[in-house]
Image: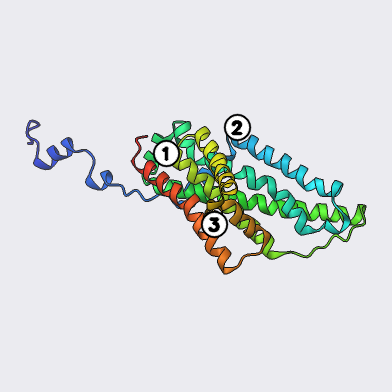
Amino acid sequence: MTNPDVISHSQAASVDNPFPPAARTIPIGRVPFLRLASVELRKQVDTRAGVWLLVTIAIISAGLITLPLVTGTADGLTFTNFVSAASSGQLFLLPLIGVMAATSEWSARTALTTFTLEPRRTRVNLAKLASASYLGMVLMVVTLAVAAVFNLIGIVWLDTGGSWEIDRPIILGTAFALILLVAQGIAFGLAFLSTPVAIVAYLGLPTVWSILSFAIEPLSGPAEWLDMTNTLGTLMSGLMTADAWAKLLVSVLVWIGIPLSIGLWRTARREP
């Protein structure tokens, strides 16, 4: 007969530790990068500020693409010109989505939640960059479709030439410039971690540098390498040469590489 007061060693171990080791060591894999990018994309378009910024971009782009129909000549109403006109507003405003995406964790005080679910902060920042660039490319595709519609309107209603010739250097250069500007917005956002400060810095610092390089003669030479506005203008005009590519690379390192490095360093060490 078993004494109820006597408990075997295995029974005691099961009482002290009711969960076997296999149940306590559940392997947890990394969050897939595409899932991170998808979440960051939703953050950019599901907020009130993001939605209104996209609406503003759509309104301005519609106005700019309509302007050539009213003021342009028949020879100038081409598919490429419509694309260039519509993308002007996107090049100016879309990088602000990158700024808000980079600063959202700190301005909305969600950094603790985000970095608890994904402690590798650099992966989160790269997901922000990928999602913002993807959003820019989606808008660029929409711009191409709208430009085709307006070119058709010019052909049917205004009896214009309506050339469908695609100037690849201009269109590809514009798309690449859009990605670079979005990356610059994210870089400034990560560097300052404050939406208003980052927006002012993104809009103000390149403008101040352009004014100084224009007003001060000794700065005009370095400005050819350090003024990203000029190098992107050459890129979007489709007139890239080996020298132009070198100048673009230097300006990108200064205006994107440096603030992005500062931002990655700050986000890696800042307490949520």
Q: In this view, does 128 lie to the left or right of 241?
A: left
The residue lying toward the viewer, choosing from 160 and 224, is 224
Q: Residue at x 53, y 50 (%)?
A: 183
Mark 3 element type: helix
Are dots 1 and 3 in contact, CB under 8 Å?
no
Residue 221 is situated, as x and y percent measured from the top left of the image, at 54, 57
Q: What residue sits right under mark 2 in the picture? A: 48
Image quadrant where one finds the N terminus: top left
**145 left or right of 15 in image:** right
Residue 5's mark? Answer: none
The quarter in which the C terminus is drawn is: top left
Q: Which amino acid does label 3 sit on?
A: Gly
- Residue 84: image location, x then y, percent: 72, 54
**Which residue is label 1 attached to?**
114
Quarter of the figure with residue 52: top right
Using the numbered discs, state the Cα–Cα distance from disc 3 to disc 2 in whole angstroms.
43 Å
The spot of residue 259 in percent (x, y) is 45, 47
Task: Give the class, few, some or many, for how many residues have Cα within 10 Å of label 2's Cα (few <14, many ≥20).
Answer: few
Where is residue 151? Give x, y as percent: 82, 55
Report the Cα–Cα distance between label 1 and label 3: 45 Å
Give whichever of 271, 76 is nearer the camera: 76
Q: Name the residue under label 3.
A: 221
Query: Please, what secondary structure does the residue beneath circle 1 have?
Result: helix
- The mark closer to the camera, 3 or 2, is 3
Label 1 amino acid?
Thr
- Disc nearer the start of the sequence (3/2): 2
Q: Which residue is drawn at 62% across and 53% down?
A: 137
Tell which residue pokes out farthest to the bottom in this image.
242
